Image: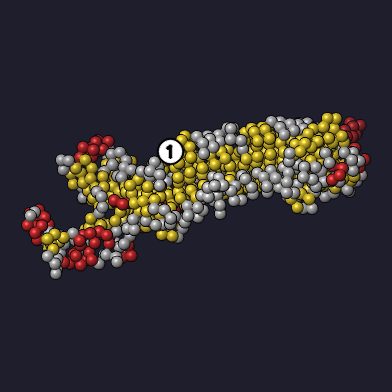
Amino acid sequence: MKKLIFVCVVFALLLTMITCLSLFCGAVEVSDAAAFVDAVEQGGTVTLANDITLTTGISIGKDVTIDGNGYTIEFSATQSLDKASYVTVSGSKVVVAAYALEVTGGKVTLSNITLKAPISLAKGGAMLLLNGAADLTLENVITSGSHFPLVYNAAATVTVKGTDTHLGKDSGNAYVVSATANAAGATLCLMNGVISHTLSDELRTSGECIFLNCATFTLQMENGSIVAGGKAVYMPNGTLTVQMRGGEIASGEGQALALDAGRLSLQMSDGCMTSSTTSVLALPTNADHNIAISGGTLRAQTEGSYVLESTGTTVISGNAVLEGSLLIAGGQTTISDNAQIIAPTYSYALSASRSRLVLVYQSSASSLIMTGGKLDIGDADGFAMLLGHTDAAATISGGRLVAGTAGSIAKLNAGTLRMQNALIVDGCAGTSTVFDSPEVSVSECIVIAKLPKAVGGNAEAVLTASAPCVKYGGVSYYVWMNFAADAKAPTLQEGAGVRAELGSQGIRFTAGIATSVASALEAEGKVTYGILIAPADHVAAAGDFTVAALEAYATKVGKNSDAIYVNVVADKSLCRNEDTLSFNAVLIDVQEANYGRKIAAVAYACVNDTYYYSAFDSNENARSLSEIAETALADTKTAAQLQEDDALKALYVYPVADTEQYSKYTKEQRDALAGYIVP
């Protein structure tokens, strides 16, 4: 029995030892080159205890983690490649003929380490060479002195992270490329850190940062920066997929992303791309690109530059911001949600001979659909939109178009431009018409202008000095609103009348609907007729004259609904005859501060909780109490006129003091009406 117990104890001890050996196998601390090379060949975890100098490049083909522990590996020599590869950088052919550290397979992690090579030695050598389907992670890694810090010769994946990571430090030559890919299918995932070529901590003013000499490549960005004096990411010919969820891609004298040929697939939800010359994205216009920008910023930073020239499918949505001009050379472009295209202090000039600028320019057969967002050219002397091709079509069915003191909303040289359900903000003092091209279709829009002017396009409306006013950016603008009638809707009579009964004076609006139409509605179910009454500026701010829009606006500004509008349900006022069912609504107890405020109205029929609204035109269906009172006081007839018409004689029965005129209102009513007039 004792022997059996002894055997069991020994067996248990052996299992424990085997377990411990398996746990700690490969976890090695090294302080010299020979120990480092041996440990890396074994795999596992290798931790530096000192700076190390290697006299040759080394190759890794298995899972290994190298923790530099803050130390440096310096390569005094590199390992020559059996077959060199060539890269054309800044117009010159450069050879990649050797490597310092080659990864041929496995999962390899380098962390907290500086990889260094003298600049003279590193010429033509890759600091990190991917020569197999490896998975390489670089965390807080600095490459110093290499012409080619990271080279893909295979479809490998490299993940870069750590705020102290810098690939391309002290590169020291105009032909340096911080990362280059010579094989299709490679992926770079930038979680954090910096990829840029610098010398003495100064960014070099030329050369590409990431050069992609391959057919396909994927760049994933979560954070960090790719910064270049020249092109930040450059692919001469291929398919580039960029998934950007944060970080920065910036170019000083080139573009953030540039392709000579091939196709770009860009999905951007956050982050920033900038360029100081030409364009942020430089893409071939004969390709079907797929660009979806739902967040982040693309910023053109120099006079005459632009963001991109789009072809294929371009979707700008969410909270995306384009600071600079968008050129549309083909395909379909969609702008929606809260996306903005704005001109900070400049925009793109069509040519050197044309001084006027343009924010969105459709130069070729293309389609632009805007359902939300904003185009704002600011105070630049130019156009928020310009269509310049017969087959260019733009439909603006939502969002805002804004032009400042020197700009114009749109110009139609050719093509089709349709404005519907949009907010147009015209701050220009030098034009007499918002849309000077009669071919522009304008319907169901809200147009505001800083000065009285004609709407233009196919609209005959004019924003006069007596038009309703709204505040935009703290500045007063004249407003014109136009909403089409729904089918089955009542008709609101033009203008408004006055209710003159003493003690309940107010504004009266009258609507009607054909008896035959009313009967058809009533056959569908329960019908309610009514009139919505609201200050015209509230209607403009709500963006539509419906219960839903006004309720949404009340919620947005944090007010009760009755502070925004009144819904007068026709009950006692319904009057039906053989031809017409009519009804009215009266707004009484208007506060003195609102005597000059434009009050708007729209009639409706509600069938089984579905609303059908009448047409609304702010020039016809919005009046102030002051205007109505002034009109009522001016409505008089002479005795001669009354002698000729018995019907008028029955209405105009009250003599107006000190005149030979007769009025429909008593002296007391006229005195009350006079009190509503605002000088």
Question: 273 left or right of 107?
Answer: left
The one of 567 and 446 positioned closer to us in this rendering? 446
Q: Which residue is mark 1?
A: 416
Residue occupying image coordinates x 8% and y 59%? 640
The one of 174 and 80 positioned closer to us in this rendering? 174
In the displayed structure, would residue 173 be above or below residue 379? above
In the displayed structure, would residue 595 be above or below residue 600? below
Query: Is residue 160 shown to the viewer in this render?
Result: no
The x, y position of residue 47, in whole percent, is 85, 44
Residue 14: name its quadrant: top right
Q: Quadrant of the N terminus?
A: top right
Q: How many numbered discs? A: 1
Mark 1 burial class by Cα count in 10 Å: few <14, some 14-19, many 20+: some
Residue occupying image coordinates x 89% and y 48%? 50
The one of 125 and 155 positioned closer to us in this rendering? 125
The x, y position of residue 61, in whole percent, is 82, 33
The x, y position of residue 153, in whole percent, is 77, 32
The one of 670 and 312 positioned closer to us in this rendering? 312
Residue occupying image coordinates x 43% and y 60%? 475
Question: 91 left or right of 440?
Answer: right
Residue occupying image coordinates x 47% and y 52%? 407
The secondary element bearing badge 1 is classed as strand
Q: Quadrant of the C terminus?
A: bottom left
Q: Which amino acid does the dot numbered 1 rest on?
A: Thr
The x, y position of residue 308, in whole percent, is 58, 42
